[in-house]
Image (spheres, rainbow, N blue to C red):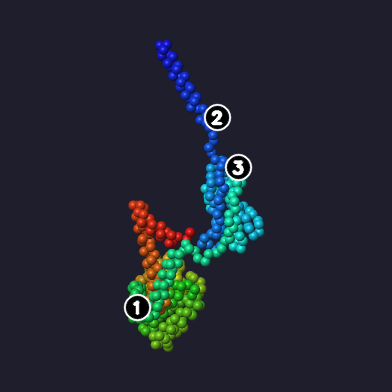
């Protein structure tokens, strides 16, 4: 029993001794602190150069850190600028932890600068040697947009090619638009019923491209109206639109060989006020009950009011606008609707003007390129993410570079 007690005391003593040893400092009096000091580190290397692909007024500063960020008390790097022409120096920026570059956008292209970088450690500035003198300058071309330039040249070349082809009499294919096919039908129906045609070229002035497209289509409709000897009524809310529309209809009657049938009262000014104009148009529709209504141009809140009124009198209605918010109302209330760009395509199709046809076909080339690039990019990104394909990842990065502006 006494032997067991002695063994237990020995175990307790050894355990206590091991615990005391474990909590003692691990560094002996002979150990040495291996953390770096500022005297052990080399100088900071600074490089300054004109910022690429900019409009001037910017210098990029880069530097290498030999290990100052590992020092206790490190607060950041101070960028110090010296104007070598005037001899003045000033601090520019204290960069956040981990930063090794800075774009100085407060410089002048007329001055020359040198830069130093100081490590801020425990309130002290450990300065580097100055960089070489540098001056900012403008670049004539942003090299990051090279692919955009190439694509622009391709599209412009396509536009010029198609314009020249149309001038030589080459037949350019344009897909069939149902609303255009209904024009002759609508004018013929109005002629048979002895009722007029109502044409509204939107509510914007001549500075809106949709109004111009509507007047171009008006020229084709007016030629058919002149041949069929049908009445046309065109209320407008802008004096310039009234003048342009009168000249368009008059030219159509002259082309049809019936200049004597033209009357300036076919186009008449109503009012500049939006809903006052709509009320006047609705009154014309209710009183004269036109057999066909054409709404081609820029429309806003009045679109559904006019379209529903025309629908209530049983008229054939052809509408077209590039205003996305108004398209649902025209689609719901009209027989045929030219959706978005179809309005401009119809203008080119009916006029047969080479410049309009060439621009339309050239724009189609740009859309085709965009669709192909999007499709290839989606496929490449999907394959690169799913199977980690190096080739697909290369294609994805190439497409990012092609269309990146930053």
Q: Residue 122's mark? A: 3
- Residue underneath mark 2: 29
Q: What element carries label 3?
A: loop
Is residue 319 visible from the viewing direction of this image?
no
**Residue 99 or residue 34, whichever sits in front:** 34
C-alpha span from label 2 to label 1: 97 Å
**Which residue position is annotated with label 1?**
171
Inter-mark Cα distance, 1 to 3: 80 Å
Can the viewer see residue 206?
yes
| Residue at the image position 59 percent from the left and 44 percent from the top | 121
Q: Earlier in the sequence, mark 2 or mark 3?
A: 2
Helix, strand or loop at mark 2: loop
Answer with mark 1 or mark 3, whichever residue precedes in sequence: 3
Given this view, does label 2 or label 1 mark the residue nearer the observer?
2
Sort mark 3 into few (<14), some (14-19) or many (20+) by Cα contacts within 10 Å. Answer: few
| Front residue of 55 and 290 | 55
Q: Quadrant of the N terminus?
A: top left
Q: How far apart are marks 2 and 3 (CA)?
A: 27 Å
Whether residue 344 is situated above or below residue 63 in the rendered picture: below
Q: In which quarter of the image is residue 48?
A: bottom right
Badge 2, how many Cα within 10 Å: few under 14, some, many 20+?
A: few
Residue 62 in picture, x, y percent from top left: 54, 53
- Estimate the x, y position of residue 240 in percent, counting from the top left: 50, 77
- Residue closest to the far top: 2
Instruction: From the image, state whether disc 2 or disc 3 is nearer to you.
Output: 2
Mark positioned earlier in the residue sequence (2 or 1): 2
Counting every numbered tag in the picture gives 3
Residue 400 picture location, percent across and down: 42, 59
User: Could you tell me which residue is drawn at 61 percent across and 61 percent down?
Assistant: 111
Q: Do the residues labelled 1 and 3 touch (CB within 8 Å)?
A: no
């Amino acid at each position: 029993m006494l032997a067991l007690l002695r063994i237990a005391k020995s175990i307790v003593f050894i355990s206590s001794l091991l615990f005391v040893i474990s909590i003692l400092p691990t560094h002996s009096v002979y150990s040495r602190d291996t953390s770096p000091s500022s005297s052990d580190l080399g100088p900071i290397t600074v490089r300054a150069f004109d910022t690429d692909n900019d409009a001037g007024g910017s210098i990029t500063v880069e530097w290498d850190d030999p290990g100052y960020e590992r020092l206790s008390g490190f607060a950041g790097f101070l960028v110090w600028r010296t104007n070598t022409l005037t001899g003045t120096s000033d601090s520019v920026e204290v960069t956040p932890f981990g930063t090794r570059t800075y774009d100085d956008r407060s410089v002048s292209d007329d001055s020359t600068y040198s830069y130093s970088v100081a490590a801020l450690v425990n309130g002290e500035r450990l300065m580097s040697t100055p960089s070489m003198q540098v001056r900012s300058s403008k670049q004539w071309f942003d090299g990051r947009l090279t692919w955009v330039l190439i694509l622009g040249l391709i599209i412009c070349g396509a536009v010029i090619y198609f314009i020249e082809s149309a001038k030589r009499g080459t037949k350019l294919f344009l897909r069939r638009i149902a609303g255009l096919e209904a024009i002759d039908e609508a004018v013929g129906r109005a002629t048979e019923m002895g009722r007029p045609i109502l044409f509204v070229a939107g509510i914007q002035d001549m500075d809106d491209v949709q109004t111009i497209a509507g007047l171009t289509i008006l020229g084709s409709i007016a030629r058919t109206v002149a041949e069929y000897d049908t009445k046309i009524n065109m209320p407008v809310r802008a004096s310039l639109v009234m003048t342009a529309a009168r000249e368009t209809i008059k030219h159509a009657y002259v082309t049809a060989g019936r200049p004597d049938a033209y009357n300036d009262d076919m186009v008449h000014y109503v009012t500049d006020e939006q809903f006052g104009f709509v009320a006047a148009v609705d009154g014309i529709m209710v009183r004269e009950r036109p057999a066909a209504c054409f709404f081609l141009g820029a429309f806003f809140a009045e679109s559904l009011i006019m379209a529903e009124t025309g629908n209530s009198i049983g008229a054939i209605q052809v509408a077209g606008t590039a205003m996305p918010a108004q398209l649902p109302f025209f689609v719901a209330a009209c027989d045929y609707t030219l959706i978005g760009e179809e309005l401009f395509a119809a203008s080119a199709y009916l006029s047969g003007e080479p410049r309009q046809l060439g621009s339309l076909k050239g724009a189609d080339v740009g859309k085709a390129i965009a669709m192909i690039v999007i499709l290839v990019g989606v496929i490449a990104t999907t394959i690169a993410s799913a199977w980690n394909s190096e080739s697909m990842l290369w294609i994805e990065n190439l497409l990012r570079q092609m269309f990146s502006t930053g």
